[in-house]
Amino acid sequence: MTQPRILVTGATGKVGGAVVTQLHAAGVPVRALVRGEADFPEGVQAVRGDLGDPASLDTALAGVDSVFLVWPFLSAEGASDVIDAIGKHARRVVYLSSAGVGSEKEEPGEAITMFHTELERLIEASGLEWTALRPTGFASNTLGWAEEVRTTGAVRAPLARLARPLIHEADMAAVAVQALTTDALLGARPVLTGPELITQEGQVALIGEAIGRPVRFEEIALDEAAEQMKAAGYPPELVEAVLPAQAELLDNPEPVNDEVERITGTPARSFQEWAADHASDFR
């Protein structure tokens, strides 16, 4: 078997998993970093390691040329050691960052973007070749509604009119593959969006369309949503950053662009396509 040259972290998640799938389908040798058992297509090499333990990464990084990095923590603590470990083996990092980094809305210490800002800074200072992908909201975050859609036929959430250009994980992956396998995006920080703004109420309606039965959106107050998030285990500082930032988007929505199409040659997938692709998760 050909020696894998690309290591994908976050390989069991939506975006990392899509990167693994697309690289494998293109015939590119790929290695997946996993913390436990995981199923991948034949020919994908799974290697144990944990980004929380940089010393565990040496085996996974051996012989690797490029790394797709998904940072799974809410702070940059330990990131410097991970990037140092990568730099001992690889020459390139493609980092899954956030559209909030570098925007006018970013504020020092702001919980949503702070660790992404620090990761980008560390990577740029490392001497590695780099690309920082800056997507807007992930369509896959709406999977958080799946259980209540299945059990109640409704979604109880704040901000029915909040409209965002949510992006399909397959489109983020397609851009990542370009950054990993070509030099076209070296030193670039492309902001990646879906093709159109869809309100949360509209997203729920499209999920209903995909599963063949109506799903209601029941709007709740921000205070109630905050208590629900905290009860579900989200850190208070994250809750206190996320909800006000979302409310601000009501009047100042994120711009929509065509970067996905410019980079990959294929238009970004719509939320309607995403919902159809994930209908089984909501049934």
Image (spheres, helix red, strand yellow):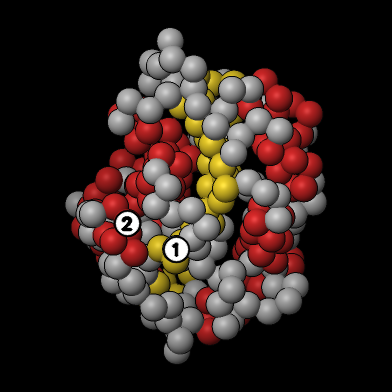
Kind of residue sitting beneath label 1: Pro
207 and 165: which is toward the camera: 165
Label 2 crowding class (10 Å Cα cut-off): few <14, some 14-19, many 20+? some
35 and 96: which is toward the camera: 96
Label 2 secondary element: helix
Kind of residue sitting beneath label 2: Ile
Q: Quadrant of residue 107?
A: bottom right
User: Residue at horizontal 48%, vertical 81%?
Assistant: 249
Residue 64 position, x and y percent, is 57, 28
Q: Do the numbered discs 1 and 2 sit on residues whose CB atoms are within 8 Å? A: yes
Residue 207 is left or right of residue 76, and the answer is: left
Residue at the spot of label 2: 263
Q: Is residue 250 above or below residue 2?
A: below
Residue 210 position, x and y percent, is 23, 53
Q: Is residue 6 above or below residue 134?
A: above
Q: Quadrant of the N terminus?
A: top left
211 and 104: which is toward the camera: 104
Q: Quadrant of the C terminus?
A: top left
Residue 35 is left or right of residue 200, and the answer is: right
5 and 215: which is toward the camera: 5
Residue at the spot of label 1: 190
User: Residue at horizontal 43%, vertical 54%?
Assistant: 185
Residue 200 position, x and y percent, is 38, 70
Is residue 79 at least partly visible in the picture? yes
